[in-house]
Amino acid sequence: ETGVTQTPRHLVMGMTNKKSLKCEQHLGHNAMYWYKQSAKKPLELMFVYNFKEQTENNSVPSRFSPECPNSSHLFLHLHTLQPEDSALYLCASSQVETGPYGYTFGSGTRLTVV
Amino acid sequence: AQSVTQLDSHVSVSEGTPVLLRCNYSSSYSPSLFWYVQHPNKGLQFLLKYTSAATLVKGINGFEAEFKKSETSFHLTKPSAHMSDAAEYFCVVRSTSWGADGLTFGKGTHLTIQP
């Protein structure tokens, strides 16, 4: 385990469903991130949370809704997704003050939209 | 804007032979560069980083990378491949446009090790 735990590991959902992805880190980091990894494409940064405040939204459609209730937990709420949203969603955390050295990634949630 | 280009989508080497994974970057400023590895069904694992302290960087599992500013390259090497090195490797640049050190990833190089 890396210290960043993502659940569930796999998720299959219909286009009308509502589901949530969860990320939890036990590293004492103060920044958390959602990345999307699609087949044959580079990892895409989706959202950044710095000290629980969202600092970046990389033009992500509103059907993805992040939530960061505290510095240890990050959620990605999903609703009315499209088949092209099927991908591996990775959560990461870091300690902002020490720079980009401490990025730690979770194992990801493999999402399939049917 | 900053970007990275991984020149090979697939690399195959024999066990015990050297590994070379190529990466070129584009950056307006002195970049921070990284290599990450992703084994099947696992998350991304940090291998090494360059942040201007030394041009030759040593990482975990015998990997190292050399920063060459004149060539805008940051190639990853290992003298002798092991079967456990088979994985996807990502070259990454720190994106200074992000408020909290977001990373920009290359498309990845799939490394296969032949017995």
Image (cartoon, coloured by chain):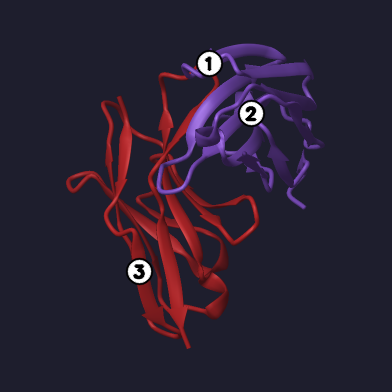
Residue position marked by numbered label 2 in the rendering = A15
> Image point 18% across, 48% down: which residue?
B71
Amino acid type for the residue under numbered disc 1:
Asn
Measured in 3D between alpha carbons, the distance from the residue under mark 3 to the one under mark 2, in whole angstroms, is: 37 Å
**Could you tell me if the residues under marks 2 and 1 are in contact, i.e. CB atoms within 8 Å?**
no
Protein chain holding label 1: A
Does dot 3 land on a helix, a strand or a loop?
Answer: strand
Position of residue B20 measured from the top left corner of the image (x, y, whole percent): 34, 67
Q: In this view, does B35 lie above or below B32?
A: below
Depicted A18 relative to depicted B16: above or below: above
What colour denotes chain A?
purple
- Disc 3 with disc 1 on a shared chain: no
What's the distance in space between the residues labelled 3 and 1, CA to CA? 34 Å
Secondary structure category for the residue under label 1: strand
Q: Are marks 3 and 2 in contact (CB under 8 Å)?
A: no
Instruction: Identify by letter the chain in red.
Output: B
Q: Residues within 10 Å of mark 3 (few under 14, many from 20)?
A: some
User: If the image is split into quadrants, where does the C terminus of chain A sit?
Assistant: top right
In front: label 2 or label 1? 2
Q: Are marks 3 and 2 on the same chain?
A: no
State the residue position of label 3. Answer: B11
Residue plotted at (66% across, 24% down) = A31
